Amino acid sequence: MKTLLQARLVNNPLGDPGLFVEFRYEKRALLIDLGDIHRLPPARLLRVTDVFVTHTHMDHFIGFDRLLRVVFGQGKTIRLYGPVNFIENVKGKLAGFTWNLVDRYEESVNLEVTEVHPDRLLKATFRAIDRFQPSNQHELSFDGKTLLDEETIKVETAILEHRVPCLGYAMIEKPRINIDKEKLDVLNLHPGPWLSKFKQMIQENEPGEAETLEVMICDEQGRRSEHRSVEELKRELVVITEGQKIAYITDTVYNEENSERIVNLVRGADRFFCESPFLAEETERARDRCHLTSEQAGLLARRAAVRNLHVFHFSSRHTHQTKQLIQEALSAYRPKSNGGPTSVG
Ligand SMILES: [Zn+2]
Ligand SMILES: [Zn+2]
């Protein structure tokens, strides 16, 4: 079964961190982190609806200008999410330009910004037509993890420690309802609009015993409609496919409390993108800079029982040791003795 989301790093592991996540069946994409994004062509950037920023250190936020440049004048609304002080950071970026003529352009671009606090979300909108003066500022309650909850996906976060709050993210595809086509034939059921109605009924609620649906039958006696039990159709026809989970962790320190938060967010991910700037022997340096070592990335992946580990955000001092960084992460993730799950560097 094909996954709904397709994720790839924006740059190679020595470049600025960032993950571009495209929807397979729509012209839509999500972006985690806004560092150097020049490798993403404008056509790709124009698909971005939501941007999840981990924190606003330069290598994670300097691409804001590039994104704004590309989407300006396209009549889009982009949602941006970030940690404490994020609204001020966006305001500061926008204040760096002169906007005296923007009110001549209708619907040029709207930015809906969400700032994540442990117990609440602060919201502000910046519209080009208002010369990017903030509007609609308000506060929402927050369950501490859910940022986006749509029909097909969910995005969760955790606030991590990097001497400033830094957000980790997990994108979760919801289970998908598929129809067993062979079974349709066996039961002489003819596909038609009733199938979408049926899927919708399954999605919305557990069908009651008495609930029926008008279906199309096609057999040797010809084509006709008949009422059938929804519960029975569900038993016969529906195949539920579990969705994929993609997790992204960068710029954070290794300690028990933080590791616990990471593992809770990342647990069971199919693809885990984890920073690995330093070598296993550099624990002191990593702690001092509030980053992870390769070995720590591997240990987190192992503890969270992820299916694939991808390490990135290598320190430029290790340009010639990238293989070592990958190998150290993988051997901590999958000790040789037990074979463990498959992994990718
Ligand atoms: Zn940082
Ligand atoms: Zn960084």
Image (cartoon, rainbow, N blue to C red):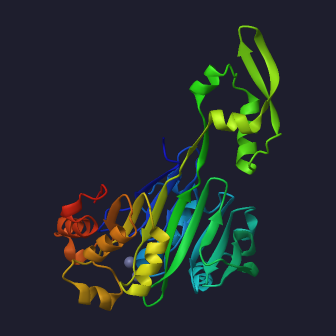
What x and y, as percent, mark residue 285? 25, 88
> For this view, does 269 lie left or right of residue 29?
left
Identify the image quadrant of residue 153.
Answer: bottom right
Find residue 104 and report its image quarter. Answer: bottom right
Q: Is residue 33 visible?
A: no
Q: Quadrant of ligand 2?
A: bottom left
As drawn, 108 above or below 190:
below
Tell me where residue 71 sits by quadrant: bottom right
Q: Residue at x 21, y 84 (%)?
A: 282
**From what the image shows, is residue 176 above or below residue 276?**
above
Q: For the point 40% across and 63% down, which residue is it?
A: 272
For image coordinates 60% across by 26% down, the residue present is 183
Residue at x 40% of width, y 75% of height? 250
Residue 154 visible (yes or no) = yes
Nearer to the camera, 321 or 69: 321
Residue farthest to the top? 220
Report the number of numbered marks. Answer: 0
Nearest to the observer: residue 334 or residue 78: 334
Tell me: 23 left or right of 322: right
Q: Nearer the viewer, residue 233 or 317?
A: 233
Residue 188, given in percent of the width and then of the height, sits at: 68, 19
Q: Residue furthest front?
A: 209
| Left or right relative to 160: residue 116 | right
Q: Position of residue 147 (x, y in %)?
A: 62, 70
Q: Quadrant of the C terminus?
A: bottom left
Q: Could you tell whether 17 is left or right of 172 in the image? A: left
Residue 300 in the image: state x and y as whole percent: 35, 73
Q: Is residue 221 above or below residue 67?
A: above
